[in-house]
Amino acid sequence: MNKNIVYFSKMFQAVPHLAQVGRVLPGTFVSTRRSTIGAFRRLYPNLDCSLAPSFLGPFSRGKRLLKKADIIVTGSPYRSFLRDYCASKVTVFHGTYMMLSREEFLKNTHFDLLCVIGPRMQQMLGRYPESENMNLVQTGFLPFCQFPEQSISQREQVLAGMGLNPALKTVVYTPSRRGIGSWNQVARQLVLTAPGHFNLVLRPHPSQALTPRTADKKSFMEVAALAATREGTYVDLGYQPLPDVLSVADLVVSDANSPSEESMFYDGPQLFIETRSYSRDYLHQAGVREQMNPDDLEQLLTLYDCGPALHVDDGVVDFSILLDKALDDAENYTEQRAAYFSWVFGERDRQANQRVAQAIQNSFY
């Protein structure tokens, strides 16, 4: 039996997850934001999408599709938005969900199916008695479906697309969102002090890159102008798919966030940035505030054991030696990276979209 399926998200962050399911179980991606639709069309031109602008009310194609849908698949709670539609509702959880408090879980209890990323999420959800009455299926991490197979030709193609030299090792910097991310302290310093034998890719958080405030735009322009003076530097404002970027990363510099976890699919060496806004202590305090189970929180903090960490304040940071040293020390963290990846994601494969599609069919067909 055919079903009308709509994949919905306001935010861009859920797009890569939803698109992978859409490739197996055809439907239409709908968003209320033009910036999200624009990014979707650029990255997934062969998949159908439609805008549902608020000013057209129920008359837009996107709103009509939502009204007629048998199944709506999304990546965020959207409880108040979705209650207007009678379709069966599914969430695939965008991001890697480093924390999932009981309060956050309860925001998702209106879903008819929750597709759980891996052992960590299953472990966290199992702490809450309400989960016993929920339809939870462990399906894997959807973006891994589009993580390319690494090869010499694949690396050359991706780096050439960014105007970078495939013969050089590549450092990828992926800070966290505004307010807690290290972009303001680190981006310029990386461009100024990273040795010339590295390619350098700077990728700010997508929420800043796609819908920037004036301050963000100014910062991006300043860093881009500086990057133009350093050969082998690329500022990626969401133009490149994250899986492609991570597939060519010889070293990932991050704030110990979702991209750093995802990069472990390729067993990528790590260098963690700690600041006053985001650090091991911040993560611990946030976990306590979210009332995480102490065992889950302790295991979460082992992310910082997957590579060296650099404490950054408001002063000048010199990466001229640090990047090479992080690469030289990478093998010392191999076992911890493997253990952490297995806890978060489970299987290291590209079949999560097949499992999500099967879970939807088993539940609603």
Image: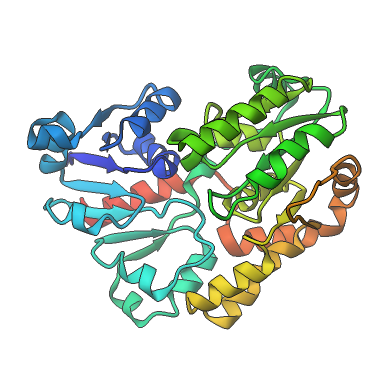
Please name whichever residue, 152 or 225, is drawn nearer the observer in this view of the structure.
225
In the picture as drawn, the residue positioned furthest to the left comes out as 59
Q: Is residue 130 left or right of residue 96?
A: left
Q: Nearer the viewer, residue 311 or 329?
A: 311
Q: Is residue 40 visible?
A: yes
> Would residue 292 be seen by someone viewing this image from the given angle?
no
Measuring from the top left, give residue 17's x and y in whole percent. Answer: 43, 43
Residue at image coords 38%, 50%: 356
What coloring was used for the rendering?
Answer: rainbow
- The percent coordinates of residue 153 (x first, y second) are 71, 20
Q: Is residue 12 above or below residue 356?
A: above
Residue lying at 62% horizontally and 46% vertically, measured from the top left: 175
| Residue at left offset 11%, top offset 53% | 86
Residue 58 locus on image (x, y percent):
8, 37
Please state which of residues 316 and 20 is positioned toward the viewer in this rendering.
316
Seen in the image, is 198 located left or right of residue 40?
right
| Quadrant in which the N terminus appears | top left
Which quadrant would residue 59 be assigned to in this image? top left
Residue 110 location, quadrant: bottom left
In the rendered view, would you say 143 is above or below 117?
A: above
Name the residue located 62 percent from the left edge and 60 percent from the top edge.
Answer: 277
User: Would residue 235 appear left or right of 364 to someone viewing this image?
Assistant: right
Q: Position of residue 122 (x, y in %)?
A: 47, 69
- Quarter residue 354 falls in: top left
Relative to 16, residue 355 above or below: below
